[in-house]
Image (cartoon, grey):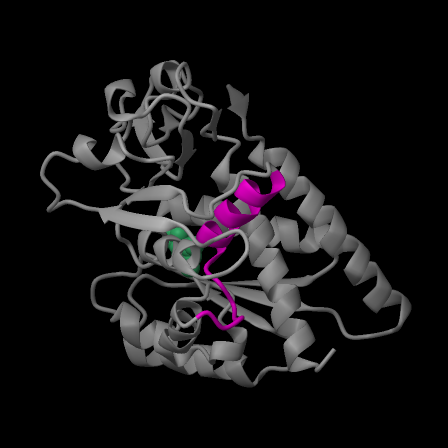
């Protein structure tokens, strides 16, 4: 079994981005900038946004965290987004999800101009992804593609089974792997909450992508021998022995599943670190496109 070291690959990508930003600095070019908008005080969101901002600064990008009150109106939030749409200092705009219930997530996503949509959630970017055009791809799915590529795991003609159909992970990874392209070209099955007997599908997977947000849902009896398993889950479970009172557990029962697979991503240290690196990649990509570099 080979452990897919997402932390290491994520660091390699950051190093490369840092070099590109150093060149911009040498040439006296303006810096790429990311604004992260967070509404309310969801503690997991606070942690994610903090990590995103810290990474921006480490790589030499401009970072701004716009912390907004949980009772801000939808109209006010849309106005703030529009301000950043027009602000030349920011090439990426990210609104951390989930949003409070009184705010329509779709309206917010559609307000960000597609050129600055570093999450790749805008319908224009989603559409471009589906038809196979280069665009800003959602960070977690893109990170999975890069991990498979770095470990030389071929996807052409392979059966990929995705469990989960979220707009953030399940749907985009399924569509990315379906493309008639190098490092894609897979046969893709998507399972979800209405799938009865999920094992029937997961047992056929050459590559299994678990992205349904249920701790240790994928057990060893659901996985084919020598399969590749990608665990996207980041579930908080209570653990009184841990400093914070919780620990992070994947969607895969790693201890038992890892014994029969060829490759597996751990949690933490697998897909998670890649998400932030791909966000940095997207911010630089948006910057280059906006500045026609
Ligand atoms: N919440 C959970 N994952 C994500 C993500 O990738 N982007 C944003 N904006 N919010 C999230």
Q: Regarding ligand 1, which quadrant of the image does it lie in?
A: bottom left
| Picture quadrant of residue 212 | top left
Residue toward you, 130 or 66: 130
Residue toward you, 236 or 179: 179
| Picture quadrant of residue 88 | bottom right
120 left or right, relative to 161: right
Residue 102's place in the image compared with 9, above or below, is below
Which residue lies at the image location 56% right of the left edge and 69% below the top edge?
92
205 left or right, relative to 33: left
Residue 115's place in the image compared with 53, above or below, is below
Residue toward you, 156 or 121: 156
209 left or right, relative to 163: right
From this viewpoint, is residue 50 visible?
A: no
List the single residue furthest toward the right: 26
* Coordinates of residue 244 in the picture (x, y in percent): 42, 26
Which residue lies at the image location 70% right of the left edge and 81% below the top edge?
291
Looking at the rendering, the stretch of residues picked out in magenta corresponds to 132-150
* Coordinates of residue 164 in the picture (x, y in percent): 26, 46
Q: Considering the image in quadrants, where does the C terminus appear?
A: bottom right
Residue 293's place in the image compared with 270, above or below, is below
From this viewpoint, is residue 161 visible?
A: yes
* Coordinates of residue 45 in the picture (x, y in percent): 41, 49
Which residue lies at the image location 28% right of the left edge and 72% below the top edge?
106
Q: Main secondary structure of the magenta part?
A: helix
73 left or right, relative to 4: left
Residue toward you, 184 or 251: 184
Query: Is-magenta flag for residue 64?
Result: no
* Coordinates of residue 69 in the picture (x, y in percent): 36, 63
Query: Is-magenta flag for residue 142?
Result: yes
């Amino acid at each position: 079994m080979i452990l897919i070291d997402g932390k290491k690959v994520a660091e390699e990508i950051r190093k490369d981005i840092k070099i590109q930003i150093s060149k911009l600095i040498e040439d006296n070019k303006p810096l790429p900038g990311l604004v992260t908008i967070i509404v309310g005080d969801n503690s997991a969101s606070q942690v994610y946004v903090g990590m995103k901002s810290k990474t921006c600064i480490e790589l030499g990008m401009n970072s701004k965290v716009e912390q907004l009150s949980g009772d801000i109106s939808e109209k006010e939030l849309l106005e703030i987004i529009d301000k950043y749409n027009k602000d030349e200092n920011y090439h990426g705009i990210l609104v951390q999800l989930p949003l409070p219930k009184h705010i329509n997530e779709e309206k917010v996503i559609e307000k960000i101009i597609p050129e600055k949509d570093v999450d790749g959630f805008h319908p224009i970017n989603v559409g471009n992804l589906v038809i196979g055009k280069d665009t800003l791809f959602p960070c977690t799915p893109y990170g999975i593609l890069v991990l498979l590529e770095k470990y030389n795991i071929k996807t052409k003609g392979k059966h990929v089974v995705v469990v989960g159909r979220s707009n953030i992970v399940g749907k985009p990874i399924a569509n990315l792997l379906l493309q008639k392209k190098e490092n894609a070209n897979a046969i893709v099955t998507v399972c979800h909450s209405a799938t009865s007997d999920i094992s029937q599908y997961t047992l056929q997977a050459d590559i299994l992508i678990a992205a349904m947000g249920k701790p240790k849902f994928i057990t060893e009896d659901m996985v084919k021998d020598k399969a590749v398993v990608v665990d996207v889950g980041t579930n908080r479970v209570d653990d009184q022995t841990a400093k914070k009172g919780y620990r992070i557990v994947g969607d895969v029962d790693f201890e038992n599943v890892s014994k029969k697979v060829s490759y597996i991503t751990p949690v933490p240290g697998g897909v998670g670190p890649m998400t932030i690196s791909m966000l940095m990649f997207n911010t630089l990509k948006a910057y280059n496109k906006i500045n026609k570099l």
